[in-house]
């Protein structure tokens, strides 16, 4: 079942906590690294099933609105965001709750060039959500499609750096829109440069603009779906 074809009647995906992610993510990154190293020798651009997506969903006060007190409504809002995510995630994907203001979705076996679809459909639903509008909240999504380099040597225990990078993407390109998102993945010139990930990830925080101009990394900008 594809992420975009999950029927509304499907049971909700179980939401895990960050304690689970501390065990799961190092395993999943190591698996992605091994797949990339094996398949990368056969296909320079890799294969869709070598990639994993880390999607951070952030809630923020809408422009001109004060930060809402979520003490009494956080459960309702969290359940609502989870329901919006469940509509676009597959059974193999994993949603997690980071805090009242942040959610995390791990997408497995992602096609990098189609990675924007999940964010696009989620953000379109969030944009049109009456509950989020009434709560005075806007929605940001930032994601990283991993591995970022043909030399995937990022120590798996440093998976939080990828989470922070996805969060960094969600905070970039701010606008007054009710929902927006940015994704980060390999650029067209990455194969020629081959910067090891252990070096690339810190550089992405410091000089993302230069890396994207050089084609080493690529930014996917999310366009909302009109009329939904």
Image: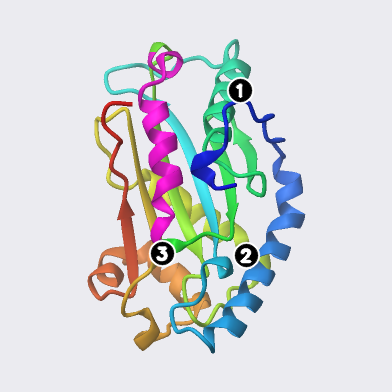
Magenta residues span 113-133
* Image position, residue 50 (x, y; %): 57, 70
| SS for callout 2 | helix
Name the disc covering residue 79, or none.
1
Q: Earlier in the sequence, mark 1 or mark 3?
A: 1
Picture mark count: 3
Instruction: Tell me the quadrant of the picture where the C terminus can be found.
Output: top left
Q: Specify whether residue 18 is painted magenta.
A: no
Residue 156 at what x, y percent from top left? Answer: 66, 68
Q: Is residue 98 left or right of residue 218?
A: right
Cα gap from disc 1 to disc 3, whole angstroms = 29 Å
Classed neighbour count for the residue bearing mark 2: other residues with Cα under 10 Å, few (<14), some (14–19), many (≥20)? few
Picture quadrant of residue 10: top right
Asked if the residue at tag 3 contacts the one at tag 1, i.e. Cβ–Cβ closer than 8 Å, the answer is no
Q: Tell me, for residue 185, which label it has, or none.
A: 3
Residue 172: image x %, image y %?
A: 32, 48
Measured from the top left, where is residue 15 in percent x and y? 69, 36
Q: Tell me: 124 left or right of 86.
A: left
The residue that mark 2 highlights is 158
Foreground: 29 or 202?
Answer: 29
Residue pictured at 68% horizontal, 70% vertical: 31
User: What SS does tag 3 mark?
Assistant: strand
Q: Is residue 220 above or below residue 213?
A: above
The mark lying in front, picked from 3 and 2, is 3
* In this view, 70 is above or below 225: above
For residue 216, side relative to residue 58 (left or right): left
Please tell me whether the stretch drawn in magenta is mainly helix, strand or loop: helix
Front position among marks 1 and 2 = 1
Marks 1 and 2 sit apart, C-alpha to C-alpha, by 29 Å
The mark nearer the N terminus, 1 or 2, is: 1
**Which of 198 and 142 lies nearest the eye of the viewer?**
142
């Amino acid at each position: 079942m594809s992420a975009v074809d999950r029927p509304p009647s499907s049971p909700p995906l179980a939401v895990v906590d960050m304690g689970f992610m501390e065990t799961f993510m190092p395993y999943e990154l190591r698996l992605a690294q091994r797949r990339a190293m094996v398949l990368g020798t056969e296909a320079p651009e890799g294969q869709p099933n070598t990639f994993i997506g880390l999607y951070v969903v952030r809630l923020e006060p809408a422009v001109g609105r004060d930060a809402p007190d979520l003490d009494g409504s956080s459960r309702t809002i969290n359940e609502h965001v989870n329901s919006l995510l469940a509509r676009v995630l597959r059974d193999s994907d994993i949603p997690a709750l980071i805090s009242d203001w942040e959610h995390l979705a791990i997408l497995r076996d992602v096609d990098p060039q189609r990675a924007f679809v999940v964010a696009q459909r989620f953000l379109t639903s969030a944009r049109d959500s009456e509950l989020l509008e009434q709560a005075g909240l806007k929605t940001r999504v930032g994601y990283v499609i991993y591995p970022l380099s043909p030399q995937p040597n990022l120590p798996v225990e440093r998976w939080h750096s990828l989470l922070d990078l996805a969060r960094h993407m969600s905070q970039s390109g701010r606008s007054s829109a009710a929902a927006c998102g940015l994704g980060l993945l390999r650029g067209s010139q990455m194969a020629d440069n081959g910067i090891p990930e252990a070096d690339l990830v810190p550089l992405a925080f410091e000089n993302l603009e230069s890396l994207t101009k050089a084609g080493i990394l690529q930014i996917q900008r999310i366009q909302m779906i009109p009329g939904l």
